[in-house]
Image (tube, rainbow, N blue to C red):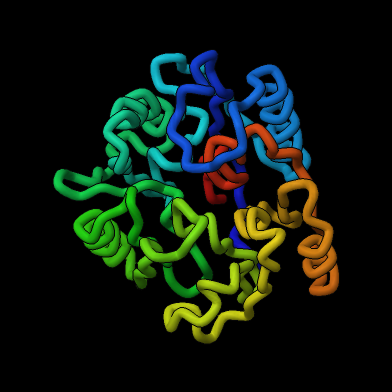
Amino acid sequence: MSQRFTHALVRPPGRTFADGLTTADLGAPDLELALEQHAAYCRALGACGLEVIQLPADDAFPDSTFVEDTALLVGRRALLARPGAPSRAGEVEAIAPAIARWCPAPARIDAPGTLDGGDVCETDRLVLIGLSERTNEEGARQLARWLAEESIPSATIDVHDVPGILHLKSGLSWLGEGRLAVIPALAGHPALAGFGLVTVEPEESYAANCVRINDRVLVARGNPRFEAALRERGYDPLPVAMSEFARMDGGLTCLSLRRPA
């Protein structure tokens, strides 16, 4: 069984969305289409049984639609992250009141640590923490200590030299039932020993960022081989259009904070 979720916290892209950070060379996003895709994403979350809580768009922070990077929700506890990009620092305080609804006194990552939620992948046996341009060793150490307080083990995976990925979860995602979706460049990492791996073919590498929500797996639309691989293993994929978020280095996990049951 995979972990169950009850709520999702989301924020639609603001009018400044195209001014956000990106390493992708896919052109500027179309805001109107991005809003349509975000609305469809929210409907998909609802179809998975979640209550969707939508925060207002925040034009002050172009990347603020990627709420996953700002916090972690683990059991009944919460931790406010410290994004590695200085332009995103204010996003944490902007989302803190919403997190306080569920956890009035969340922990925090402190300087000089940095941590993006996109570098944190929870599984049924441990939490995988990516070391990246956005998450440094001190941030990973602070997260590991916080997890250890709940007897949750963790392991780090350095993705600095893995081409084409910004965060750890750009290259792998938890599927439940002991499996991870993973790009070939990460498949041989020792931290993944013992997991069942569903390898995402290079031409569909964007699909590695998927998200298991209750009985469904949200997948980026346009990746038929990965969808077929999931169905062969008994999963029920739910395709969601993500073209405008891909232009800004964003994926399916980035667009929500999911609250565990």
Count of numbered circles in the view: 0
Give the residue at x 66% y 26%: 34
Is residue 129 something that shows in the picture?
Answer: no
Judge left or right: residue 80 versus residue 169.
left
Give the residue at x 63% y 73%: 179
Q: Nearer the viewer, residue 142 or 169?
A: 169
Instruction: Judge whether 91 appears above or below 171 on screen.
Output: above
Q: Quadrant of the N terminus?
A: bottom right
Q: Nearer the viewer, residue 24 or 66?
A: 24
Report which quarter residue 171 is drawn in.
Answer: bottom right
* Residue 162 x %, y %: 45, 65
* Residue 133 x %, y %: 33, 51
Q: Nearer the viewer, residue 155 or 106?
A: 155
* Residue 165 x %, y %: 49, 55
Judge left or right: residue 242 versus residue 145.
right
Give the residue at x 78% y 46%: 221
In the displayed orientation, state which residue is furthest to the left.
112
